[in-house]
């Protein structure tokens, strides 16, 4: 089902990543626009996507966001990935895409749960269409946090139900456990992407139920790209760390 809407294809996203020559997605979990803009400028050449939680930014202002984050990211060939984890019915997800943060106006990829039904994908794409833009949805099939309820059966249902939906570019998998990634890859095949959070070279850095795996192992197990936050942004040398993660994920 394409639902008659244009979307950012898996091929377009994969070739944008190939052009950048890195499989690192930066989780920029910072609190101000200046901090995010700074880290983007610092490590932009070693990342393929900038993942944000825009509702966690204390001083959010759309004009500044567009000028200081979105435009520089576009110039660097970095895709904008809003990890909003939409979960409501299709229409509400659409109005959230078009709400205060205007996610549809700048995000290229957003995350969503499959729990509420397939219409959530339609609602999200409807918002992009209203803005004259296109994007794609990464659906949560697994999570990296301990004690989560996304079990194997749920994961299989998610993957099977999204297989034929062009507006879904792929799935979020659990990067902390290589066997979870390889199982997910055999379920998914090669047609869609697997993006994996829960990645850190120092597993001791995990906080509040987070679990960490190694970037090289995640890629070897079938991940398209690793999502790294603390390992880069909390490093004393973010540029060196980003370069290191990029090297760990290169073939
Ligand atoms: N994130 C996870 N695990 C998940 C999903 C998303 O950690 O299962 I779905 C997000 C949360 C945070 C980033 O923005 O990925 C990981 O950051 P750290 O590398 O700092 O743990």
Image: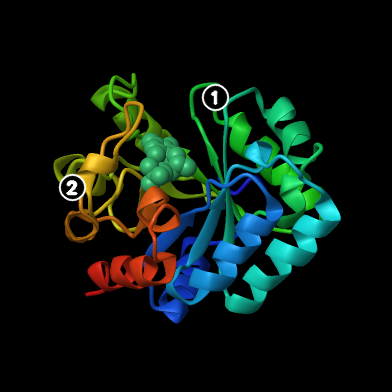
Checking the image for residue 182, the label placed there is 2
Task: Describe residue 104's horizontal placement relative to residue 38 as left or right.
Answer: right
Q: Examine the rendering and report whether any part of residue 132 can be seen.
A: no
Q: Residue at x 62, y 56 (%)?
A: 35
Q: In which quadrant will I find the C terminus?
A: bottom left
Element under disc 2 = helix
Query: Distance of mark 2 from mark 1, alpha carbons?
Result: 26 Å
Element under disc 1 = loop
Image coords of residue 14 (percent x, y): 44, 68
Task: Describe residue 20's horizontal placement relative to residue 224 as left or right.
Answer: right
Determine crowd level at label 1: few under 14, some 14-19, many 20+ residues with C-alpha closer than 10 A: some
Q: Examine the rendering and report whether any part of residue 99 can be seen.
A: yes
Q: Nearer the viewer, residue 225 or 153?
A: 225
Q: Residue at x 57, y 26 (%)?
A: 87
Position of 47 relative to 114 (above/below):
below
Checking the image for residue 23, the label placed there is none
| Residue holding disc 1 | 117
Position of 131 relative to 155 (above/below):
below
Image coords of residue 184 (percent x, y): 25, 42
Q: In which quadrant will I find the N terminus?
A: top right
Image coords of residue 222 (percent x, y): 23, 56
Q: Quadrant of ligand 1?
A: top left
């Amino acid at each position: 089902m394409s639902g008659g809407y244009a979307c950012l294809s898996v091929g377009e996203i994969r070739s944008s990543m190939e052009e950048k020559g890195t499989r690192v997605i930066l989780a920029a979990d910072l609190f101000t626009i200046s901090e995010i803009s700074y880290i983007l400028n610092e490590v932009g050449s070693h990342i393929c996507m900038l993942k944000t939680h825009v509702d966690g930014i204390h001083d959010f202002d759309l004009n500044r966001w567009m000028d200081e984050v979105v435009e520089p990211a576009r110039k660097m060939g970095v895709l904008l990935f809003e990890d909003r984890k939409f979960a409501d019915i299709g229409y509400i997800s659409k109005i959230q895409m078009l709400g205060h943060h205007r996610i549809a106006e700048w995000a290229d990829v957003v995350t969503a749960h499959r729990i509420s039904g397939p219409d959530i994908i339609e609602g999200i794409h409807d918002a992009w269409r209203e803005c004259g833009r296109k994007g794609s949805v990464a659906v949560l099939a697994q999570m990296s946090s301990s004690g989560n309820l996304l079990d194997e059966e749920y994961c299989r249902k998610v993957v099977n139900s999204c297989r034929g939906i062009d507006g879904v570019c792929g799935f979020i998998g659990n990067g902390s456990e290589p066997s979870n990634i390889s199982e997910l890859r055999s379920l998914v095949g090669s047609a869609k992407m697997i993006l994996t959070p829960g990645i850190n070279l120092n597993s001791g850095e995990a906080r509040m139920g987070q679990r960490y795996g190694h970037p090289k192992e995640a890629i070897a197990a079938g991940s398209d790209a690793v999502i790294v936050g603390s390992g880069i942004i909390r490093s004393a040398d973010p540029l060196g760390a980003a370069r290191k993660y990029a090297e760990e994920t290169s073939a």
